[in-house]
Amino acid sequence: MAFFSRLDLQEGLQTLSVLQWIPVYVFLGAIPILLIPYFLLFSKFWSLAVLSLAWLAYDWNTHSQGGRRSAWVRNWTLWTYFRNYFPVKLVKTHDLSPKHNYIIANHPHGVLSFGVFINFATEATGIARIFPSITPFVGTLEGIFWIPIVREYVMSMGVCPVSRSALKYLLTQKGSGNAVVIVVGGAAEALLCQPGASTLLLKQRKGFVKLALKTGAYLVPSYSFGENEVFNQVTFPEGTWLRLIQKAFQDTIKKIMGLNFCTFHGRGLTHGSWGFLPFNRPITTVVGEPLPIPRIKRPDQKTVDKYHALYINALRKLFDQHKVEYGLPETQELTII
């Protein structure tokens, strides 16, 4: 009985670790968004709101200049439970020399990019041990850094805006040994993720290659096998009224918030039930061989296209070498659109 109780406790802690983003991003985000205007207009605590906004203005450039990462936060035991929920694993195929800077391009986006978060924004899979002397920075939407409290939390994990200025600063102004991690397909690619699918938005995504050329950062392909397996996405048949409602809602969210809204589901609190927890399926992020890139102040389109093609070839090679080992059939092909 004690053995099974320990198993239940471990599973419960793993589930809670996955759910932690709800209080962090919803409640911690809602507190300043709702309370600051209220304090300013209707409360005697208006000075607290002023101080909060003053600090945000004073500290505004920090998140675009490397942030304030915390080894303590990145090593929380919470992330170990989060890792074990799936589980998530990081695999190195080649060393990354601290003499260079890197752009680690990751695919696919999936619904919530669990592999990128656990492997690069925490130490749960041992990135500091696997890639010694390399400092990872995970790029995400800049809007998150406009929210007091939440911005401090995400900066502590080494998360930065995916803006050109923030990434260029990290690759040119902080010495060597830095690696910015970009999910190239972005939120738009999330609409393509389906179990068993390997479809990437990459053919016209060339900004990361141009950034590599301008900074001289090496390009590193990486693929998170299993990322598309942890949720089932529902896309209603074209021509049905459900599809019309779904598309209208997605278009509205895109215009208002700049986000691509997925209609997805996973498991519930108990196995076999329906809910919004991800399925317990392994995610393995394989980091490939770095592609040396020359530093060119103003690369022309022909040069960008050349290195973009070289990158795609390297990514296909990485995918084909590891797909069977990490759960995909030999016949599975990488589709790039």
Image: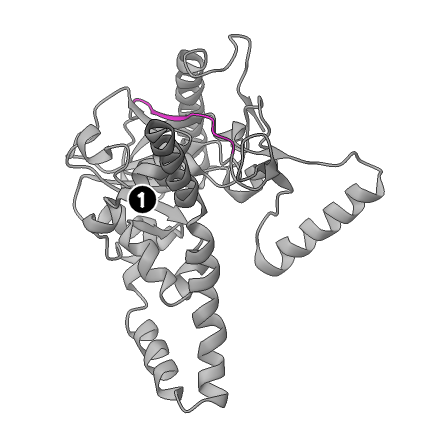
Q: x, y (%) of residue 264? A: 62, 39
Residue 141 visible in the shown view: yes
Residue 136 x, y percent position in the rendering: 26, 41
Residue at the (35%, 82%) spot, across then down: 48
Toward which corner of the image does residue 63 lie, by quadrant? bottom left
Q: Is residue 114 above or below residue 281?
A: below
Q: Where residue 27 appears, x then y in whole percent?
A: 46, 63
Residue 213 visible from this viewpoint = no
Q: Residue furthest top?
A: 330
From the viewer's perspective, is 101 left or right of 224? left
- Classify residue 242 as left or right of residue 211: right
Quarter that holds the N terminus: top left
Q: Residue at x 47, y 29 (%)?
A: 280
Q: Which residue is mark 1?
A: 78
- In the rendered image, which quarter is residue 89 located in? top left
Which one is in front, 298 or 247? Answer: 247
In-image side of 287 versus 331 (left or right) = left
Residue under the point 52% across and 10% down: 329
**Residues in magenta, as a range:** 279-289
Looking at this view, name the residue that lies furthest to the front.
1
Secondary structure beneath disc 1?
Answer: helix
* Residue type at numbered disc 1: Leu
